[in-house]
Image (cartoon, rainbow, N blue to C red):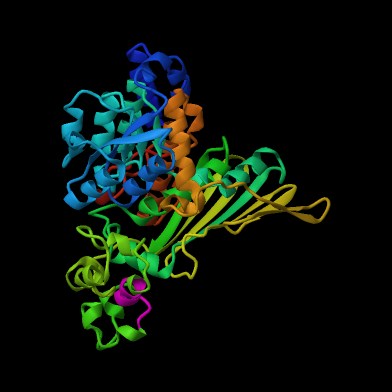
Amino acid sequence: MELKWCLRVLSTKLEQRGRPTGGFDSWMGQNSSQGARMTSTVVRVIVVGAGSRGEIYSQFASLHPDRVMVVGVADPRRFARTKLQQQHNILDENIFEDWHSIVQREKFADAVLICTPDRLHKEPAVAFAKQGYHILLEKPMATTAEDCTAIVEACTQSGVMLSVGHVLRYDPVIHKIKELIDAGVIGDVIHIQHLEPVGFYHFAHSFVRGNWRNEAESSFALLAKSCHDIDLIHHWAGPRRCVKVSSFGSVSHFGKENKPTGAGNRCLDCSIEGNCPYSASKIYLDRVKQGHTGWPVSVICPSSLPDIESVTEALRTGPYGRCVYECDNDVCSNQVVNMEFEGGLTAAFSMVAFTEEICKRKTTIYGSKGELSCDGHEVHVFDFLTKRSTKHKAHNDAPRHFGMSGHGGADYHLMGAFISAVANNDPSHIRSGPEETLLSHLLVFEAERSRLEGRVVYCGKIGQRPMTEKHTDVKMIST
């Protein structure tokens, strides 16, 4: 079966229902009255999942109360939902422990921000789409190809807009790269080299001790952390499809076999903690002592605001105080993905945990007329004809004093685009819509398939052997 089977099934089902198959945008254009039936000047949103991402996205309402209002929240954690209620003055009747209670009620908002854990995306996304809510869905879309496809199908059939939290699409610097490519500044794109430096303590926090450390509880690292990056490469490649993909990666360093002699099971009780760069005391306790209570400190105290006392207790009893060599982590700490696209374009992606920089991507794109490079802050283009280098700046008006400055201000711009799309019933504001995002997600699944099976995956060939039992969800390859 082929990867675009997913989209073919989607189109077939829509055609059977008498709906146009010209794509999500054209469908929305022909159903504008239905999509706009609850749209008003101030867009009303419900936050499902009031953790770090839900709280960050909802801050847009504090900055722009004339554009958006948070009118409901669902989260099983009392502290998290109460905190969001207080921040946005949400009525008691619209506070829920479970999102199921919301869809049982009559619709009372225009859109929903789904920021639940990765494996809990599909069910609420499909349910809210059927209720007519426009959806901003935190990445990844879901943890299986089938679930990703089901979400796109539900949104398309229901005539609601879907924006996936590929925030880097909204980073002004990243957007500048796409503009320069489309303008032909470097000619035909020949090769893309892209690096994601996760950061040594960021990886220890999120992928060794934290929520994304274990594939059975979350998803594999390439999907959880780097679907952003595969999406960008897919985006920069334009209409050219991927025809081959290979990947290699492993769990390095963070294992019992590398635990130093004399190390304890918890950092607070470890006699050699002072010599460990991954010490939880250094990562969390030292920060709160210096008055820093934002990420990553804010994550480890789920039932209270972080202070010295609560952080110390969290490190003494919770998962974030564990020795990094005694955790149940099994996701890759370093991985490479090689891709070949139509027309001979090649791309190489690297993700590595052990870096000084934290998520400051580095990109070089080699074209027939020039070379483009980006360090995450500025874009430089070297012209082969003039032999001159030009610096291209991107305007960024994201506020710096709010959490929405994250990802280079992309969090802010993502929310701005989504709210504009809903307010104007115009999905063209969304840069991370359903169909293209689905294709880039499916490419991620294929890359992981290559890593697990130890072979090149020829995208588009029929009769490829299914993945191992652990990944039987991935049976399609791109065409």
Q: On the image, which quarter does residue 300 sit in?
A: bottom left
Q: Is residue 85 magenta?
A: no
Q: Position of residue 373 (x, y in %)?
A: 65, 56
Q: Residue at x 43, y 43 (%)?
A: 63
**Bounds of the magenta segment:** 276-287
Chief secondary structure of the magenta span?
Answer: helix
Q: Which residue is drawn at the image coordinates 53% and 41% (left, top)?
A: 235
Q: Residue furthest top?
A: 18
Looking at the picture, does residue 307 appear above or below residue 100?
below
Indicate whether 18 appears above or below 148: above
Residue 271's spot in the image, x, y percent? 25, 88
Q: Position of residue 2 (x, y in %)?
A: 40, 34
- Going 44% across and 56% down the picture, which residue do you hit? 247
Q: Classify residue 153 by image quadrant.
A: top left
Q: Left or right: 12 with respect to 26?
A: left
Provide residue 218's location: percent of width, then percent of height.
27, 52
Residue 336 appears anywhere in the view: yes
276 displayed left or right of 247 = left
